[in-house]
Image: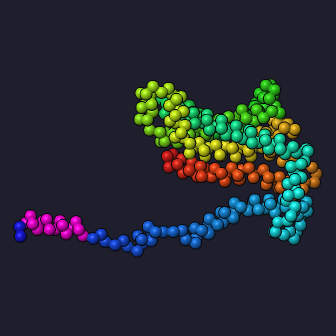
Amino acid sequence: MTTATRTTARDRVTTTAPTPPASPRTRRVRGARPGWFVYGCLGLVLAGSVFPFYWSFLIGSGDAYTLRDPHMSWIPGGNFLANALTVVNDPALNFWKALWNSVFTSALIALSVVFFSTLAGWAFAKLRFRGRGWLLAFVVGTMAVPTQLGVVPLYVLFNELGWTGKTGAVIVPALVSAFGVFWMTQYLQQAVPDELIEAARMDGASSFRTFWTIGLPAARPAASMLGLFTFVSAWNNFFWPFIVLDRQDPTLPVALSLLQSNHFVDYSIVLAGVLLSTIPLLILFAGAGKQLVSGIMQGAVKG
């Protein structure tokens, strides 16, 4: 047998040699499933998240003395519907008008923040202009300024414009957010390749058309996350609406604060109202939870 023949045979043996079986440890890693410790931690997190809702329902389904009862039962009572109707039908509260104001202002603020933040993020991420880095740093730096510092001049401004007591005074200061601009800038830097923008420009598309047809659809997962969090933040906002709105035309958090403005506070009524105010948010998260998770995951990977 010649040397070439021996070499070919050795190569054939090497090529056809079976792959050694994976070790038991490798098989355990590949087919690993969460154990009892992981499920136990997730169960504790779930219980801690659900408990505030259960506590609100527990107190809201009782009467005025439930919270003060030293032998309070952990089983919900049967007064929740009556307490909820008391909140809804309270003439001083004006529940339905407050609910509409919260829905309207939160939705408009969320849509505005998503659009303007995506537009500004597109400019910072994909357009080349002088001072871009310094301007982005300035926008991000405004996040360190406390909101309370601007309350007095902002109130004086809206008072001069005659907007105090109107929902526009709540909407206009929140039309765009520094966090939204930063978030969309980081996402769009990796989500849209520069070659796609150059191809659109060669086809004669304007800058805004390129943004509308390429940037906005690509930013949908991150924009969905930003819109949901902005809606929740605007819905729960109490400080500025409490200052600038009248008690006859409030948002829902401001209206619910009227339930505990008396000397005797009926916490069963208060917590029934609080639970009613969280129902729209639960419905929103149940319907848009998939978009929320997708936006967070894609934003984390691309950022």
Residue most extreme to the left: 2
SS assignment for the magenta stretch, majority: helix
* x 86%, y 64%: residue: 78
Q: Is residue 136 visible?
A: no
Number of on-image labels: 0
Q: Position of residue 138 (x, y in %)?
A: 59, 33
* x 47%, y 42%: residue: 190
Magenta stretch: residue 204 in it?
no
- Relative to 284, does residue 29 appear above or below in the rendering? below
- Magenta span of residues: 3-17
Q: Position of residue 171 (x, y in %)?
A: 73, 35
* x 41%, y 70%: residue: 26
Residue most extreme to the right: 263
Apparent side of residue 284 relative to residue 265 in the rendered image (left or right)? left
Q: Position of residue 258 (x, y in %)?
A: 87, 46
Magenta stretch: residue 16 in it?
yes
Apparent side of residue 150 relative to residue 291 in the rendered image (left or right)? right
* x 48%, y 27%: residue: 205
* Residue 176 figure quarter: top right
Which scheme is used to colour this image of the protein?
Answer: rainbow
- Relative to 245, does residue 23 appear above or below in the rendering? below
* Residue 156 figure quarter: top right
Which image quarter is the N terminus in? bottom left
* Residue 19 figure quarter: bottom left
Q: Is residue 31 visible?
A: yes
Q: Position of residue 85 (x, y in %)?
A: 87, 53
Nearer the observer, 231 or 287: 287
